[in-house]
Image (cartoon, rainbow, N blue to C red):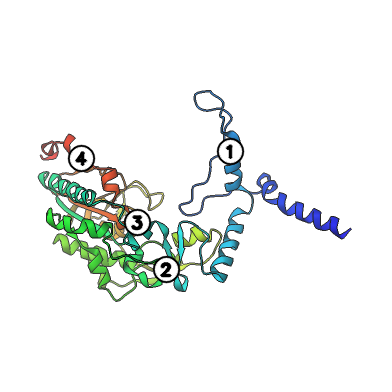
């Protein structure tokens, strides 16, 4: 009898995740996770979908009931007992520090760019600068360092670093050679005694963004609000992107700085990841900003918005430099791990006439 009870309980546990899909709310994606869409029997052109069974398997694997709870429990077990991450995009480091796996090539100095490609990236940026300056705008380029470029001490020891140059080391000399107006955040941030990146996130803290803002504005030679000297409060409110990938049902929050910043959104964004965000600040000393940015601009853009009467904050690539007008300030920010995107999505400067926007 006891074997029948055991067998029934085992079968019930096996059926619970699938059967639960009928009764529990749909599983939602965690952080940057992309879940398989629900398969369809027919394609848009009316033909039968011959991959429906394999797509159904992927869909069930991503959406079965209690999936996020099970993923979280498994991650907690492996990080606690084995000090390793079961999530392929997350590296579990010392003292609970989490790192983004896509930065591993940069950390280990395994260049994914050739010397010629590094030179082409710098040349493309120099062309962007020349284009903006021809339209009467000021141009500044900056690279946000990967987290483990600034704070490598908590990376697992098994990841060895080579002595060869990585992508950043290949590109940086060409930026100088080609005369790019470059703000070196690597040197600036590494010189700060404070820890300016989040332990469970791949990005800088609000404090790090505030100091980066001050450095960028000093590099431009423009008047600015010195947020590095401003008061702030600290609240346990931040849910790290890497933490959410690893523990989708986890409840830990990390300390984050909160500043009083004077600006307004033209239209409130849905999230800080919106492709286009526009802001105004009536009392700002500077005119219009065009900030071409990636996810590091999520924390950076409010500080910059406070110093410009208008700001266009865009994640669009290729960069929409056709919008540049006389008197604008253009800042292009890209994270170290994404440098190759400048080659992948180059702006079509050759199709644009500088005279078109100069009035």
SS class of the residue under badge 4?
helix
Residue holding disc 4: 322
Answer yes or no: is residue 301 visible.
yes
Residue holding disc 3: 298
Of badges 3 and 2, the one in the foreground is 2
Spot occupied by residue 244 in the image (x, y as percentages of width and height): 49, 59
Residue holding disc 1: 54
Closer to the chain start, of discs 3 and 2, is 2
The residue nearer to you, when weighing 105 against 97, is 105
Residue 270: image tag: none
Spot occupied by residue 345 in the image (x, y as percentages of width and height): 28, 43
Residue 206's place in the image compared with 44, above or below, is below
Q: CA distance from mark 3 to mark 2?
A: 17 Å
Mark 3 and mark 1 in contact (Cβ < 8 Å)?
Answer: no
Closer to the chain start, of discs 4 and 2, is 2
Of badges 1 and 3, the one in the foreground is 1
Residue holding disc 2: 199
Mark 4 crowdedness (10 Å alpha carbons): few <14, some 14-19, many ≥20 = some
Closer to the chain start, of discs 1 and 3, is 1
Closer to the chain start, of discs 4 and 1, is 1
Find residue 179 and report its image quarter.
bottom left
Closer to the chain start, of discs 4 and 3, is 3
Q: CA distance from mark 4 to mark 3?
A: 23 Å
Image quadrant holding the N terminus, namely: bottom right
């Amino acid at each position: 009898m006891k074997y029948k009870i055991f067998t029934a309980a085992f079968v019930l546990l096996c059926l619970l995740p699938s059967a639960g899909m009928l009764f529990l709310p749909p599983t939602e994606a965690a952080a940057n996770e992309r879940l398989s869409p629900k398969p369809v029997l027919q394609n848009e052109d009316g033909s039968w979908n011959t991959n429906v069974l394999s797509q159904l398997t992927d869909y069930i694997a991503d959406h079965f009931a209690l999936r996020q709870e099970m993923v979280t429990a498994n991650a907690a077990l492996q990080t606690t007992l084995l000090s390793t991450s079961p999530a392929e995009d997350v590296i579990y480091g010392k003292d609970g520090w989490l790192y983004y796996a896509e930065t591993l090539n940069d950390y280990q100095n395994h260049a994914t760019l050739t010397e010629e490609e590094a030179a082409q990236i710098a040349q493309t940026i120099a062309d962007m600068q020349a284009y903006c300056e021809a339209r009467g705008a000021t141009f500044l380029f900056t690279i946000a360092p990967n987290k483990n470029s600034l704070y490598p001490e908590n990376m697992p020891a098994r990841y060895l670093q080579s002595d060869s140059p990585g992508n950043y080391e290949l590109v940086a000399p060409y930026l100088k050679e080609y005369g790019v107006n470059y703000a070196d955040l690597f040197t600036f941030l590494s010189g700060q005694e404070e820890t300016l990146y989040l332990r469970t996130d791949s990005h800088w803290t609000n404090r790090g963004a505030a100091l980066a803002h001050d450095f960028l504005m000093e590099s431009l030679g423009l008047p600015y609000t010195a947020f590095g000297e401003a008061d702030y409060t600290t609240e346990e409110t931040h849910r790290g992107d890497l933490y959410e990938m690893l523990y989708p049902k986890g409840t830990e929050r990390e300390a984050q700085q909160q500043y009083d910043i004077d600006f307004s959104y033209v239209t409130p964004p849905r999230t800080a990841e919106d492709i286009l965000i526009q802001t105004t600040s009536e009392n700002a000393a500077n005119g219009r900003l065009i900030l071409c940015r990636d996810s590091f601009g999520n924390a950076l853009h409010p500080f910059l918005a406070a110093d410009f009467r208008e700001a266009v904050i865009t994640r669009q690539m290729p960069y929409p430099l056709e919008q540049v007008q006389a008197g604008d300030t253009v800042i292009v920010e890209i994270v170290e791990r994404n440098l190759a995107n400048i080659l992948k999505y180059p702006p079509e400067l050759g199709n644009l006439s500088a005279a078109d926007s100069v009035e």
